[in-house]
Image (spheres, grey):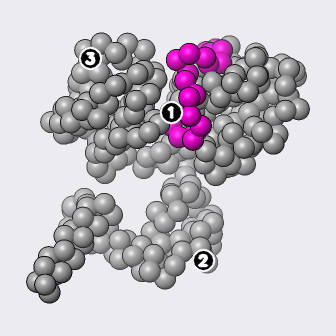
């Protein structure tokens, strides 16, 4: 059983570029996989490994002295939900695309999972799902508004065009793990919205702590790893994933004529070039060959590195 850990904290990291190497080296040593984003504004990511390895990463961060308010959520998976380790340097740990939005200076009111039902059951509260459209489609809170965004960068434009009518009302927002809501409530505060609330720990903490018979959550929650989605008690859900567009798909989708394993699904069929389709088919072929050999497929990133090196070598020979 693998421990899966989602964690983030907004904290000023002036040395975030230098911090990458020791963090990555430790994670390699502990055989931890997943993705960590580092930026001047903090840290965000989801990782998996043995319980002792995950504990080791958390201890390393807490020993640093700056990560004393880490938002941490644990779940479990029978197989590793990540194929590789990435520690990336970014401008933002969650990309809103608006400068000078600082949750450390101004943010909405945190509401814990036990108090969330009472808040969103108030008819005067406007409930907004800050996640993307495909996430909303497989599950959300009863009565939540879908902004119909494809990326979090679209949220400021959505606010400008749609939320003016709710000025003066209580606005409650939620997201997967809580991080997008910290940014979005901080942004709304800069736009003059005063009564702004968000679910502390996000949907994941709610599904972990609130009993299913008391829950106002409907459907499943999309997660950004190979589990695809989770349900109450953070158990793995029923969805699979299209490895072309990365969207969640059902067994019914797999029966559709436009579904081709690893290549397309009803949502993305016809939206890729012939070159991309050929590359997806080759990737799927390599994945299946690796499975037959009992090996793990090294993935697109490593394949691209190998391809790039081969091209450079070929060019040198030509010159």
Q: Which residues are magenta?
A: 94-114
Crowd tier of the residue under label 2, counting other residues whose Cα lies within 10 Å: few below 14, some 14–19, many 20 or above: few
Q: Residue at x 56, y 16 (%)?
A: 105
- In the rendered view of the protein, which quadrant contains the C terminus? bottom left
Instruction: Say which element carries label 1.
Output: helix
Q: Residue at x 63, y 66 (%)?
A: 267
Give the CA separation, mark 3 to mark 2: 49 Å
Q: Using the image as rendered, state which of residue 236 and residue 87 is in the foreground.
A: 87
Would you say the residues marked 1 and 3 are in contact, meaning their CB atoms lie under 8 Å apart? no
| Location of mark 2 (residue) | 270
Q: Examine the rendered structure and indicate whether residue 292 appears above or below residue 134.
A: below
Residue 113: image x %, image y %?
Answer: 62, 18
> Given this view, does label 2 or label 1 mark the residue nearer the observer?
2
Q: Residue at x 33, y 64 (%)?
A: 300
Res. 64 mark: 3
- In the rendered view of the protein, which quadrant contains the N terminus? top left
Q: Is residue 30 left or right of residue 190?
A: left
Give the CA separation, mark 2 to mark 1: 34 Å
Does the magenta-highlighted stretch encompass residue 29?
A: no
Q: Which of marks 3 and 1 precedes in the sequence?
A: 3
- The dominant secondary structure in magenta is loop
Residue 46: image x %, image y %?
Answer: 40, 36
Instruction: Say which element carries label 2.
Output: loop
Crowd tier of the residue under label 1, counting other residues whose Cα lies within 10 Å: few below 14, some 14–19, many 20 or above: many
């Amino acid at each position: 059983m693998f421990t899966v850990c989602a964690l983030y904290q907004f904290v000023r990291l002036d040395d975030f570029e230098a911090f990458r190497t020791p963090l990555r080296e430790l994670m390699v040593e502990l055989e931890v996989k997943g993705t960590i984003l580092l930026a001047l504004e903090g840290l965000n990511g989801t990782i998996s490994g043995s319980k002792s390895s995950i504990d080791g990463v958390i201890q390393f961060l807490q020993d640093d002295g700056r990560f004393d308010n880490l938002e941490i959520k644990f779940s479990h998976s029978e197989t590793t939900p990540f194929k590789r380790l990435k520690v990336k340097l970014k401008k933002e740990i969650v990309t809103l695309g608006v400068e000078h939005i600082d949750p450390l200076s101004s943010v909405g009111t945190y509401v814990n999972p036990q108090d969330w039902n009472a808040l969103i059951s108030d008819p005067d509260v406007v409930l907004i799902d800050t996640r993307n459209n495909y996430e909303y489609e497989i599950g959300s809170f009863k009565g939540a508004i879908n902004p119909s965004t494809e990326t979090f960068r679209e949220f400021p434009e959505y606010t400008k065009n749609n939320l003016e009518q709710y000025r003066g009302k209580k606005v409650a927002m939620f997201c997967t793990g809580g991080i997008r809501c910290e940014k979005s409530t901080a942004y709304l505060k800069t736009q003059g919205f005063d009564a702004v609330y968000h679910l502390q720990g996000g949907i994941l903490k709610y599904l972990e702590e609130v009993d299913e018979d008391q829950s106002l959550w409907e459907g499943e929650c999309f997660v950004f790893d190979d589990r695809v989605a989770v349900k109450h008690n953070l158990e793995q859900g029923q969805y699979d994933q299209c490895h072309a567009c990365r969207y969640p798909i059902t067994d019914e989708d797999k029966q559709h004529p436009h579904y081709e394993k690893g290549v397309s699904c009803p949502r993305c069929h016809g939206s890729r070039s012939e070159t991309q389709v050929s590359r997806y088919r080759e990737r799927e072929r390599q994945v299946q060959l690796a499975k037959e050999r009992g090996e793990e497929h090294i993935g697109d990133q490593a394949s691209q590195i190998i391809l790039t090196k081969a091209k450079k070598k070929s060019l040198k020979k030509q010159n």
